[in-house]
Image (cartoon, grey):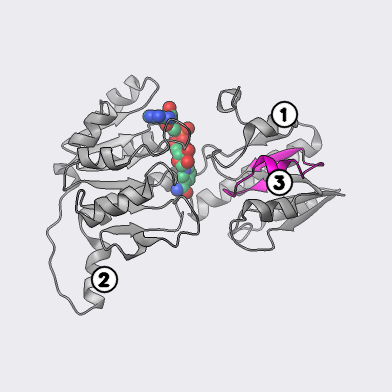
Amino acid sequence: MKKVLVTTVPFGTIDSQPLDLLAGQKGLETVINPIGRRLTSPELGDLIGDVSILIAGTEPIERSSLERAAKLKIICRVGIGLDNVDLECAAERGIKVTYTPDAPAPAVAELAIGQMLNLCRFLARTDQDMRQGIWKRRMGRRLATSTIGVIGAGRIGSRVLRHLSGFAPNQVLVNDIVSIDQLCSETGATFASKDRIFAEADIISLHVPLDASTRDLVSMPQFEQMKSSAILINTARGGIVNEADLLIALQNETIAAAAMDVFEQEPYEGPLRFQDNCILSSHIGSCTTDCRFAMELEAVEDALRHVRGETLHNEVPMECCPP
Ligand code: NAD
C-alpha cells in the first residue's frame, strides 16, 4: 500500500468526492492530518516518513522534512502559493510538485473587494460599536471616489481589476513585474510604479507571491509614503507586509486601516488583534465552497494521475523553481 497524507484542513468536508476518489484507487491508504490544524515543520517531519503522496496545505515543507521522506514521490499543493515548499530540495530528490493555480482566484478576489467595502464603510467597526451600545454614524468613502492601487496583476489581481471596473473608481493604479498592457486597456487601469501607488492610493490591495522580491514589500518606509487616510489589504501572504511596522503605522495613524487575511505565523495570535483599525480574518481567502472543492478535487486528480502514470495537469512550471 502507498500512503497518502492529507495535511491541509479542512479536507473533504464540503463534498466527500476528493476522499472518495482516493479511497476508490486500489493500493492507496489515506491518512488525514491527525492534529487538525496547520502542521509545524517538526510535526510534518514526524508524519512523513512512510508517505508516498502528500496532499499539502500551507504548512512549511522544508528540507528537514523532505530528507525524512524516503518514499515521497509527489507533493500536490491544494492552492497556488509555493512559498512554503522547498522546491529546490524537492527537485533534487526527484519529488514532483503540483498545485491548483486557478481554483482559488475567484474567492480571493471577492474577499479583497469585500474588505475594501468593509473598511471604506466601517462595517466591522460599526457592528462592534453597536454591540457596545454605541450608535455612531461614521462617514465613509465610496470606491468611485477613490484611487485604488493593485500590486500584482496575475490570476487574483486581474480579477480584482475587472471587479473594480464595475465600481468606476476615480483611478486604478496597477503594478506588476510583467507586461500588463492588455489588462490595463481592458480594465481602464493605469500601470504605475510601486512608489506611486504607495504615495497616491487611497486603497492598496496586494496580490503578489511571497518571494525574495516581495518579503517586507510594505514596511515602515512604505507606510511613511502613504496617505494618512490610506487603507491596506493583504490577502496574499504573511511576510509581504511587515507586521511589526504595520502595528506601529496603525497605532500612530500613519495609515487609517488595514485588513489582513494572512500572517507570518498562522494561526495568528499577535497584537494586531487589539487594534480596532485592523480587520483580521483567518486565511479564509479561498474558503468558499466552490473554490475549496475545486482546489481539493484538482489536487487529488493530479495525485491519481501520478499513481496511474498519466501526464500531470498542474505540475509547477520550471520558472517557479529555483535554478
Ligand atoms: P499569480 O502567480 O497568478 O499572480 C501573481 C502576480 O504577481 C504575477 O502577475 C506576477 O508577475 C506578480 N509579481 C510577482 N512578483 C512581483 C513583484 N515583486 N512586484 C509586482 N508584481 C509581482 O498568483 P495569484 O493566483 O494571483 O495569487 C497571488 C498570491 O495570492 C499567491 O502567491 C498566494 O500567496 C496568495 N493567495 C492567497 C490565498 C488566501 O487564501 N488568502 C489564496 C490563494 C492565493
Distance between mark 1 and mark 3 Cα atoms: 17 Å
Instruction: Find disc 1 in the rendering and name its residue.
Output: 92
The percent coordinates of residue 306 (x first, y second) are: 76, 36
The stretch drawn in magenta includes residue 262: no
Q: Mark 1 or mark 2, which is nearer the start of the sequence?
A: 1
Check if residue 56 falls in the magenta segment: yes
Q: Are marks 1 and 3 in contact (CB under 8 Å)?
A: no
* Residue displayed at 31% across by 50% down: 246
User: Is label 1 or label 3 in front?
Assistant: 1
Q: Is residue 44 above or below residue 156?
A: below
On the rendered image, what quadrant is the C terminus found in?
top right
Per the image, the residue denoted by label 3 is: 54
Q: CA distance from mark 2 to mark 1?
A: 51 Å
Visible residue check, residue 312: no
- Which mark, residue 213? none
Would you identify the image quadrant in which residue 86 lies? Answer: top right
Graded by Cα atoms within 10 Å as few (under 14), some (14 to 19) or many (20 or more), the crowding at tag 2 reads few
Which residue is found at the position 25% from the left and 50% from the top? 249
The image shows residue 204 at horizontal and vertical percentages of 27, 41
Question: Residue 185, image x and y in percent?
Answer: 28, 23
Q: Mark 3 vs ligand 1: CB under 8 Å?
A: no
Q: Which residues are magenta?
A: 55-76
Instruction: Name the residue beneath numbered marker 2.
Output: 128
